[in-house]
Amino acid sequence: MTMAQPALVRVLRRDRVVVLATLGVVALLAWTYLVLGAGVRLDAAPMVTAAAPWTLRYAGVMFVMWALMMVAMMLPGAAPMILLFAMISRRGHPGVAALRRTTAFGFAYVCVWLTFAAFATGLQWGLTRMMLLSPAMTVDSQMVSGALFVAAGIYQFLPVKQACLRHCRAPTEFLAAHWRAGAAGALRMGLRHGLWCLGCCWALMGLLFVGGIMNLLWIAALALIVFIEKAIPRGKLAGRLVAVGLLAWGAAVLVFA
């Protein structure tokens, strides 16, 4: 081992701590907003309801809520990819260049979910206009709720879902196949990874309209499913078990609707 190698190991360890701490703080702040800033309580009795008038300010509040909800739910599952990206960037780009590339990668990933948050806000507005949301911000139809459960369960088994999940669960293969140089390359890679992640999880995110957009326990349960699918060794099997549960739940809701 050369004299430079121990120094590199120390730097990589330090970067890992910095990246993990940064991701942890961002996710914690997002969860704190959901619990306090948006008025979510453990009893799922929200201060913000579907009965509130949709002014421009209210739409902005809803977008911020959706945006931070996506950050809180999706960032933990993306941590392995971001950590590996930071490590490889440090090896090839010493100094602040590696930090800039990692920041660009993470920013691009988050932008994908901010776009989804904007779409979800618009969908929430549309459902409210059609009087399909209850005051607790859940779909006010058992038939629609059951159909959403069944659709999410079916999607879990589809090849497109499995292809997206494969990319999310294999950061080394993803980076090897899509590596691009420079900050612009990092942005492209972050966007690409974000799109794979969106393809993997959008159906589960749709279930927020079933369990309650402001229901903290429901949000936490879906976030845990996403994290297990992406980050644990048996995540793919766990995802299939979740799919079976969603199908059974949806069938029960439809039968007793």
Image (spheres, rainbow, N blue to C red):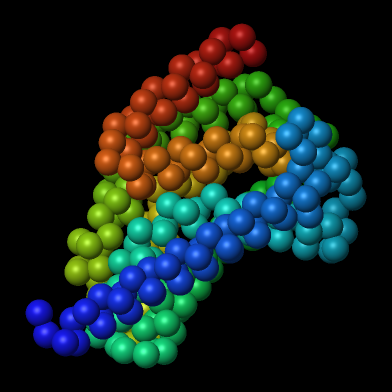
Q: Quadrant of residue 254?
A: top right
| Quarter of the picture holding the C terminus | top right
Is the residue 101 above or below the residue 251 in the image?
below
- Residue situated in front as seen by the camera: 253 or 219: 219
Percent of width and height locating residue 124: 71, 47
Q: Is residue 195 visible?
A: no
In this rendering, position of residue 179 left or right of residue 209: left
In the image, taking residue 74 as reference, residue 256 lies left or right, namely right
Q: Residue at x 36, y 34 (%)?
A: 239
Residue 143 appears left or right of 113: right
Residue at 77% of width from left, 62% of height from top? Answer: 60
Pinpoint residue 75: horizontal percent, then vertical percent. 49, 57
Residue 98, compared with residue 226, is above or below; it is below
Q: Residue furthest left?
A: 1
Residue at coordinates 52% horizontally, 68% vertically from top-left? Answer: 22
Picture coordinates of residue 232 (x, y %)? 33, 42
**2 or 122, which is in the foreground?**
2
Residue 234: which quarter of the image? top left
Does 66 sit above or below residue 46? below
Going 42% across and 82% down the picture, which residue do you hit?
99
Q: Quadrant of the N terminus?
A: bottom left
Residue situated in front as seen by the camera: 18 or 125: 18
Q: Quadrant of residue 117?
A: bottom right
Q: Is residue 29 visible?
A: yes
